[in-house]
Image (cartoon, helix red, strand yellow):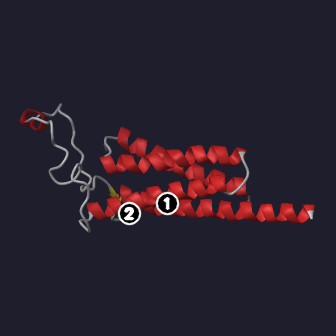
Amino acid sequence: MTRNLMIMLSAGGSAALLAGAFLFQAMGYPPCAMCLWQRWPHAAAIVIGVLALRFPGRVLPALGAIAAATTAAIGVFHTGVERDWWEGPTSCTGTGGLEGLSGADLLTITGPRVVMCDQVSWELFALSMASWNAILSFGLMFGWIIAIRLSAASTTKDSSRTA
C-alpha cells in the first residue's frame, strides 16, 4: 500500500459519493440544505487529493482527513435530525424554509419543491443517504489517515538513507 494509492482511493471515494449524490438528484431526489452542506467537503477532498498526489508530505492528507471527517460529522448530525434525535436548523425542518412562498406555490405542481432536512427521502437497509454518507465518509477519513502514516513512514526512510 502506498501513500499515493491511499490518496487516490480516498479522494476517489469522495468523487464517487459526490457523483452518487448528483445521480440521485438527477433521478428526482432533490437535495435539502444539509445534503448540500455534505457535498462541499467531498469537493474539497477531491481537490486536496489532486494536490496531494503532486506535493509530498503529510499536510494535504491531513486536510483530506479533516474534509472527510467534516462531511461525516454533518451526515451524523443530519441523520439525527431525520430520526428526531435532536433539532435541526429551522430553515429546513418542520415548517421552516417556506418564507416567500405563497399558498398558490404550495398547492401547484409546477411550484418550487420544498425539501425538508428532517424527512428521509430514500433508505437502504433502514439507513438514509445522510447515514450512508456518514459511514462511508468515516471510512474515507481512515484512508486519509493511512496516507498520513505512509507519508510519515516514507519521510523516516528518506531521512535514514541520508544519515
Image coordinates of residue 108 in percent, x first then y, are 12, 33
Q: Residue at x 62, y 48 (%)?
A: 49
Question: Which residue in the structure is indicated by mark 1?
Answer: 69
The one nearer the camera, 87 or 127, is: 87
Instruction: Quote the CA–CA distance across marks 1 and 2.
Output: 10 Å
Q: Residue at x 56, y 46 (%)?
A: 46
- Kindly tell me whether residue 1 is visible in this rendering: no
The one nearer the camera, 163 or 51, is: 163
- In the picture, measured across the screen, residue 122 lies left or right of residue 103, that is right
- In the picture, measured across the screen, residue 1 lies left or right of residue 84, that is right
- Outermost left residue: 103
Residue 76: numbered disc: 2
The one nearer the camera, 140 or 92, is: 92
Q: Residue at x 41, y 51 (%)?
A: 38
- Outermost top residue: 110
The crowd level at tag 2 (other Cα within 10 Å; few <14, some 14-19, many 20+) is: some
Secondary element under disc 1, as helix, strand or loop, is helix
Q: Residue at x 33, y 65 (%)?
A: 126
Q: Amino acid at mark 2?
A: Val
